[in-house]
Amino acid sequence: MSRPAFRLLPHPLALALLLALPDAAAQAPTEGREPEATELDAVKVFGRAQTLYRSEDAAVATRTDTPLALVPQSVQVLPRELIDDQAAYDVTDLYRSISGVSYFSYAGVTLRGFRQENVLYDGLRGDPYAGFSVPQLFNIERVEVLKGPAGALYGGGEPGGVINYVTRKPQRRALRRVEVSLGNEDFAAGSFEATGPLSDRMRYRVGLHADGDEGVRWNADSESRIGDASLAFDVGVAGEFTLQVTDIEQNLGGNRLRGVPATDDGAFLTDRRWNHNEATDFLDMDARVALAQYRVSPSTDWDIELSARWFENSEHQIYHEPMGLIDRDGDGTAEWMTRQLRNQLRDNEGLTVAGNAVWRFSTGAVEHKLLFGADGYRLDADFRAQTANSADLASGAGPVPGIDLFAPAYGLSSYLDYGLDALPWRGTSTRGVRYGGYVQDEIALTPRWQVLAGLRWDGFEDEDRLGGGRVNGHDLSWRLGSTVVLREGVNAYANVASGFVPQATANQDPAAGGPFDAERGRQWEAGLKTELAGGRVMLGAALYRIERSNIVQATGEVVDGVNQLAALGLVRSEGLEIDLLADLTERWVLNVAYAYNDARVVEAGSNGITNASGDRFANAPRNKLGLWTRYDLPALSSAFGFGLDYTDERLSLDGQRVAPYTVFDLSWQTTLGPWKFQANVKNLFDKVYAASGFTERTGHFPGEPRRLYLQAAYAF
């Protein structure tokens, strides 16, 4: 498929705003008048770690303003400073800094042992990258990770936790920034951002980003564009109304990317750049998002928030799916990858509405922070597909040729050669509705002892709009936790929380044994959150156990030609997480995230548990260590950074070994007045490794080879 060359063009709206905004006028002292002496308030000096990488702003954990140190649950926040230092362009660049998180596939991760793909934006459902695209970070201010079941606040979701992306909003201080980046593999990117006041009661933000890359897999190029604009209005004395629109486009050539075939011991059978796709294959995604949010604090006792988020996402992909290796030339080595051609279209449209309020009051000497609210989410998902089969299998007479594993000859055929116009279409059309209400009380029993209790009721309805089937139900989630201040800077906490996941609509067929109650998850967690050495060292530790039950699996029995299902599954995940953020000196910052996890199947049906191999979960490493350290050189207005990412041995979905790996990164940055220059080297020693495993026929996902990024930014 012919694609236009990468270009970054100035947007007319951006230019108009740029020209219209006046510079702040400098006010000179009146001539002949002595300057008045001003008594300044005492200034608290924070260490580099706290000013660079620490954030207490994480409303995802409780939907209130409670400091993270007092939240009885493990929560991590990755602020924009860390994102910029690591030159993280998409979310996969950040996994080293989140304890308990490792790569699974595309935008999916393993979180506390369980595969996780659902995310939130500004605390609301509706992922514009839904499908096979990876969330980009250009318009993201910070990433928040709430560990464990989050059903008491957010309804049904995987028990490992939830990831929330907080988007960038208009600021009261004027700032404009232009950035250009270059790198190997013909990488180029450019962006423009501007924010500031339009009047005393109105603020704006506009952002434009574009990038292009030839890619590290053969035939796999990419282009992305993001446009983001928002306005914020002061309403009355204490209210703020924000409107935001975002447009996203991704064009990925030679996609959808699968892995590279590997031995059972985890070694790639061929070059890590090998691709099963032709250059004419593609994955094109377009998405649009609109957010409206109103926040008001009518008094010191009340906070109120109302939000609505709408998105639509269209994804078209034509690609060659690897179907397994065969020994075509009879030399005893399977060298020929058979392939299907898949033409797939996905359209998603979702709407979330939510409202909550916080009421602060006292009953005698006991202080309360009462949260209550409700939300609803509707998702319409349409899928259409065609398939052309392999020409290289005795069981099929399809037109699609395979590709050699060791000497691939690309360009001999394309999707235009397979007669797609004559192939039948198959498809699905579904509507999923989620709605619920919740209440939560944070109780300060004493200045050193706090208790959190939350309860949520959820209803759901799934509709097959083609077949006419409909499934509905409801469930309860809850959480109970407590934090005790042992001494200043040392807090101990414990919690128990529940969550649930509605069963897939396809599993609710009465002929197969359905309908079934939702899957249940429960977590027990205890930990410490400490500030030591006068606040220079922040250390968090968490021990947890998560159990997931009522998992629907095949029983192996067939009744009237229908495979029977039953709620047979029970799985357990146990682990330890340690997070350290420290000022080693006044110039030297260290950030460490370590996790140990043992996720196992306790009870399974005859066909095993989805996303597991035997009694172990796929892509769930026992040990994972991420490190990032930064050393500042004030005399040179510069800073050096160094990163390490270690991931232990794992299993693929088919039980193949995924070898452990360690990769290292370097960064350097310097500022010259309004200019900032930065260089990042990722995978410094060009390590060949698998980021995760999938199936035997699709192979392991290779990690990126060494990448170099150079960046120049000008702020004005």
Image: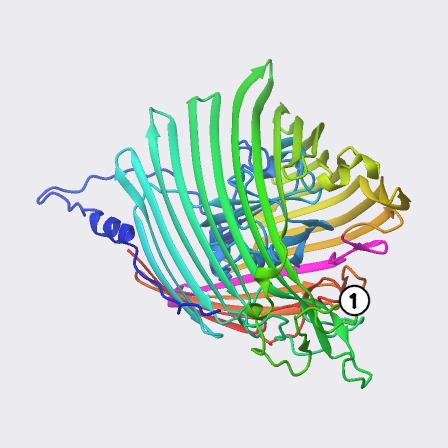
Kindly tell me whether residue 557 is visible in this rendering.
Answer: yes
Furthest residue in direction bottom, as rendered: 331
In the rendered image, residue 630 lying in the magenta stretch gets the answer: yes
- Taking the spot 48% from the left edge, 33% from the top edge, the residue there is 308
The one nearer the camera, 553 or 625, is 553
**Amino acid on which disc 1 is placed:** Arg
The one nearer the camera, 151 or 65, is 151
The picture places residue 425, in percent across and down from the top left corner, at: 62, 53
Q: Quadrant of residue 422?
A: bottom right
- Taking the spot 81% from the left edge, 45% from the top edge, the residue there is 572
- Taking the spot 38% from the left edge, 68% from the top edge, the residue there is 636
Q: Residues within 10 Å of mark 1 (few under 14, many from 20)?
A: many
The one nearer the camera, 485 or 243, is 243
Furthest residue in direction top, as rendered: 364
Q: Quadrant of the C terminus?
A: bottom left
Specify start and end residues of the magenta stretch as a single range: 611-638
Label count reads 1
Which color scheme did the rendering employ for the protein? Answer: rainbow
Furthest residue in direction front, as rendered: 422
The picture places residue 340, in percent across and down from the top left corner, at: 67, 66
- The residue that label 1 is drawn on is 657
**Residue 530 horizontal side relative to residue 602, left or right:** left
Furthest residue in direction left, as rendered: 32
